[in-house]
Amino acid sequence: MPDTPTANDLPNAPAAERNFEPILAALRVEFVGCRRVLEIGSGTGQHAAGFAAAMPWLEWQPSEMPGQLESIRLWQAASSLPNLSDPLEIDVASASVPAGYDAGFSANTAHIMSEYHVERLFRLMGRALYPAGVFCLYGPFTEAGRFSTESNRQFDERLRLGDPKMGIRAIERVDEFAERAGLSRRRRYAMPGNNLLLVFERAA
Ligand SMILES: C[S@@+](CC[C@H](N)C(=O)[O-])C[C@H]1O[C@@H](n2cnc3c(N)ncnc32)[C@H](O)[C@@H]1O
């Protein structure tokens, strides 16, 4: 059994550290009346640990692709929070969907997954959430065919050069996937770094 890690030993994604506070400010509003949150693509797990600590009324359920849970487990062990659940293995492409959540969250995943997988992410949320449940999706998006900045356009170019299936998604396409899954976009928050936090609600 390894020793419990200290904060300094934990895997750290600088982007997740930078965007933590602005995302938290929006989630405090959106998740105020919620109880159970399902996070998709938790990455290092630092968001899950930080959000669970900052919003103790929530039961936070992190998840990651099969075989990629180790970092989340390290953050969980270091934080030892009663409201941070053991991570689940979830690939949005898989058919089995956990249910019983009134909130969903995913950060910086839509441009990393293929567009097909983004559609599956919405389908998953459409089934995992109770009616009137909310899903908050954070990341960069294009609107009306335009990148918000030249740096986002260059980022998109780099992503697609590395893997043609990756890329910054059009907000209109994302809204279409949401509608097909029974979710509608209700609100949007402008975030630092030209990112957005989009809030979808499952039909009541
Ligand atoms: C850029 S990272 C973001 C991680 C974390 N949410 C954050 O903000 O730091 C993108 C994440 O999406 C996850 N991901 C990619 N494809 C996925 C899929 N098909 N199902 C679930 N997660 C996926 C990756 O494993 C990775 O952790």
Image (cartoon, grey):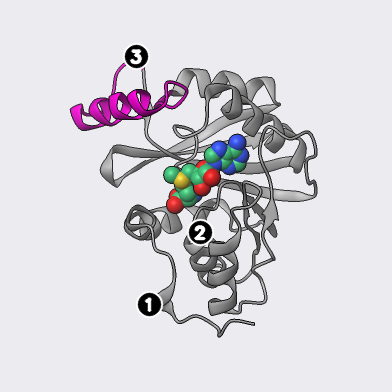
- Which is more N-terminal, label 2 or label 1? 1
Amino acid at the residue labelled 1: Asn
- Which is more N-terminal, label 1 or label 3? 1
Of circles 2 and 3, the one toward us is: 3
> Local crowd at mark 1 within 10 Å, few (<14), some, or many (≥20)?
few
Which residue corresponds to the image point at 42% horizontal and 78% vertical from the top-left? Answer: 7
Mark 3 lies on residue? 145
Q: Which residues are magenta?
A: 144-169
Is residue 151 visible from the viewing direction of this image?
yes
Give the spatial CA distance, label 2 vs label 3.
31 Å
Where, quadrant-wise, is the N terminus in this rendering? bottom right
Q: Are marks 1 and 2 in contact (CB under 8 Å)?
A: no
> Local crowd at mark 3 within 10 Å, few (<14), some, or many (≥20)?
few
Of circles 3 and 1, the one toward us is: 1
Secondary element type, mark 1: helix
Mark 1 lies on residue? 8
Which residue corresponds to the image point at 54% horizontal and 33% vertical from the top-left? Answer: 186
Mark 2 lies on residue? 28
Amino acid at the residue labelled 3: Gly
Which one is nearer the viewer's eye here, 179 or 62? 62
Give the spatial CA distance, label 3 vs label 1.
42 Å
Q: Percent from the top left, x then y, of residue 170?
A: 43, 21
Which residue corresponds to the image point at 51% horizontal and 18% vertical from the top-left? Answer: 173
Is label 1's Cβ within 8 Å of ligand 1? no
